[in-house]
Amino acid sequence: MISGIRALLLLLPACLSLMAQQTLTFEVASVKVSAPMTPGTMKGMMFGMRGGPGTADPGRATFSNTSVMNVLTRAFDVKNYQISGPDWLDSERFDFTMKVPEGTTKEQFNVMLQNLLAERFGLKFHRETKDLQGYELVVGKNGPKLKETTLVEEKKPAGDGPPAPPMPPPMLNGPPKTDANGFPVLERAGMSSTMRMGPKGASSHMTARAQTVTALAGLLTMQLRRPVTDKTGLTAKYDFTLEYAPEGGMMGNMRINGMPPPAPNSLDAEESGPTLMSAVQEQLGLKLEARKTPTGMVMIDRMEKTPTEN
């Protein structure tokens, strides 16, 4: 009898934690299919995730024209390559509007998202660890082709005075400057990634100002959907550009007018540009070496493509 009571006492905290997670919900939540994106309607559309705990608007969160994959990565606090599920997670886009209870932490907000996805999309999942193909970013045999940034960062004032005000985010005040090819020119520290369709196929252009190679590895992780670890040993900040032919991934999955983008093998590689991995080596003097890494995964067992009504 005593051993049975002890077992129940040991299980009680876990049960209470599970019950607490199951009861975490938004005060009000709306999920709607986003309006179709066409060349004529994209101007003025809102994209991305705003609000929630840790932002200037903690009581309200709005996800506009957002894929379910993006919501899942937020809900489980993982990278996109750690989610295994149906292809439509990337292609179908939705508008989420959520009223967040006062005092909600980021961790609680994530659980609320999980519960919302379970309620509206019938989400069922399990976790497991897999040996996932990833990459180590190293210096190429001929050395890096990166140039240290020419941007002079503002320094903090000497003494005990107040810190220097933060630099405003890039490209928020008025239209961005562009180069001869129409790609953004960054005047402040940051990264920009753009994809365009032209007569020779799709072309992606990545611009960085005053960024580390570790930050580059993070962006490559998003594009390749595989873990990329910086092993270059380079610690400075750099200005660089990268041009390549998209091969799917985050931007390649965007649909225009309801039609899927061209399949990667339908693009003429010679005309549309080098692959991302080739461009990293040819244009930056770096190299991506394949490595397998044990990685925690969120495996989607069931998820409906159409959410239930609000």
Image (cartoon, helix red, strand yellow):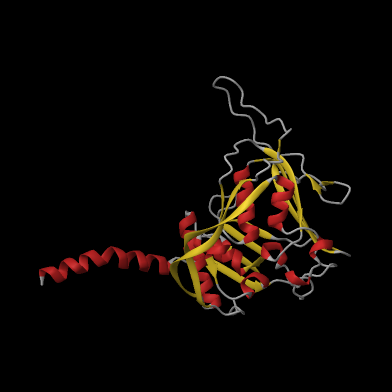
Q: Nearer the viewer, residue 1 or 308?
A: 1
Q: Is residue 104 visible to us here? A: no
Residue 260 picture quarter: bottom right
- Please state the horizontal and vertical placement of residue 75, each as a whole percent of the image: 52, 63
Quadrant that contains the C terminus: bottom right
Q: Residue furthest left?
A: 1
Residue 128 picture quarter: bottom left
Q: Is residue 64 visible to us here? A: yes
- Please state the horizontal and vertical placement of residue 258, each as a whole percent of the image: 76, 76
Residue drawn where x is 71% and y is 55% of the image: 278
Q: Residue furthest front?
A: 141
Tell how many labels: 0
Q: Nearer the viewer, residue 97 or 149?
A: 149
**Looking at the picture, does residue 235 appear above or below residue 106?**
above
Residue drawn where x is 58% and y is 26% of the image: 162
Q: Nearer the viewer, residue 252 or 69?
A: 252
**Looking at the picture, does residue 159 appear above or below residue 289?**
above
Quadrant that contains the N terminus: bottom left
**Looking at the picture, does residue 123 appear above or below residue 290?**
below
- Please state the horizontal and vertical placement of residue 133, each as a whole percent of the image: 54, 62
**Looking at the picture, does residue 100 appear above or below residue 162?**
below
Residue drawn where x is 16% and y is 66% of the image: 6
Q: Relative to residue 308, is residue 245 drawn left or right?
A: right
Residue 7 picture quarter: bottom left
- Please state the horizontal and vertical placement of residue 274, each as a whole percent of the image: 76, 58
Q: Residue furthest top?
A: 159
